[in-house]
Amino acid sequence: MHVKPLHPWPSGVAEAEAVQDRLRAHVELTGPDTFSLIAGLDVHYHGDEEVTAAVVVLDAATLAPVEQVVAHGRVTFPYVPGLFAFRELPALVDALERLTVTPDLLVCDGYGLAHPRGFGLACHLGVLTGLPALGVGKTPFVGTHETPGEERGAWTPIVHEGVTVGRALRTRAGVKPVYVSQGHRISLDTATEQVLRLASRYRLPEPVRHADHLARHPS
DNA sequence: GCGACAG
DNA sequence: ATCTTGTCGC
């Protein structure tokens, strides 16, 4: 599939923040509410600079894998909370460009709107591909939230600067919640619904689990 | 001012 | 992210 070029690529923190501030205007918070091909994305780190990015596309109805691709690369950007996307984006875009099918939803490992400047990895990937995208985080990042109820499906809003930017969602009874936020072309209700549907067996959505496995054990 | 801070 | 064993539970 085609992905918009990453250029201009920032060389430092200030430039990276400026890129986020500029691209944020392109984010759309509404979109389709059903999907047929769902992609999970993840990156695995080896040593200091080497990374493997993996994308796994699942049939939305059966969750059967349709296509799997990996891309190897080197990380150039330092880890700065809020600029995390600049570490993983090049390898993830390489992997996406190797797909022969075009998914209609990207499930990203990280945040979308729930980000210091409202433009996390899921927003960035959504804008570059033009596809609906959502982010699933494993630990709280920005904003405040109450602990959701212990039952599967329970959720509470994540509020940042007076605005709801995501939800803490319990995907399995008695297991730590996950943190869902919109990336691009999706409503918060639809993002929540998809994550809950994709995470009935495990805490994290199946597409992300498949991608994580593939990135660790490329075949 | 200081610490905390997606992966 | 990663460095790491056993253990509890389905």
Image (cartoon, coloured by chain):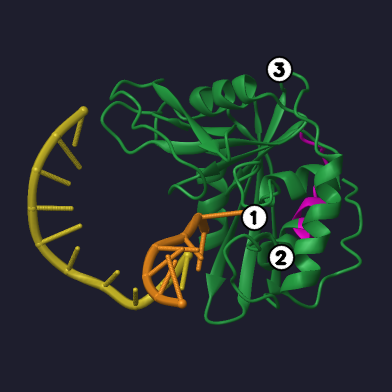
Chain colours: A green, B orange, C yellow
The one nearer the camera, A32 or A162, is: A162
Q: CA distance from mark 1 to mark 3?
A: 25 Å
Q: CA distance from mark 2 to mark 3?
A: 29 Å
Q: Is residue A66 above or below residue A212?
A: above
Mark found first going from the N terminus, 2 or 1: 1
Report crowding for label 3: few under 14, some 14 to 19, many 20 or more residues within 10 A (C-alpha). some
First of labels 2, 3 by sequence position:
3
Q: Which residue is mark 2?
A: A86
Location of residue A107 in the rendering, given as x and y in whole percent from the top left corner: 63, 39
Vertical arrangement, residue A209 with respect to residue A10, above or below? above
Asked whether disc 2 touches disc 3, contact meaning CB atoms under 8 Å apart, the reply is no
The residue segment tinted magenta is A93-103
Q: Are marks 2 and 1 in contact (CB under 8 Å)?
A: no
Please tell me whether mark 2 or mark 1 is closer to you in this view: 2
Q: Which residue is mark 1?
A: A54
The residue depicted at 33 percent of the width and 32 percent of the height is A147
Q: Earlier in the sequence, mark 1 or mark 3?
A: 3
Q: Secondary structure at mark 1?
A: strand
Question: Which of pointers 2 and 3 indicates the residue nearer the eye?
Answer: 2
Q: Is residue A97 on the magenta stretch?
A: yes
Q: Read off the chain for label 2.
A: A
Say which quarter of the image contains residue C2: bottom left
Which numbered disc covers residue A33? 3
Q: Chain of mark 1?
A: A
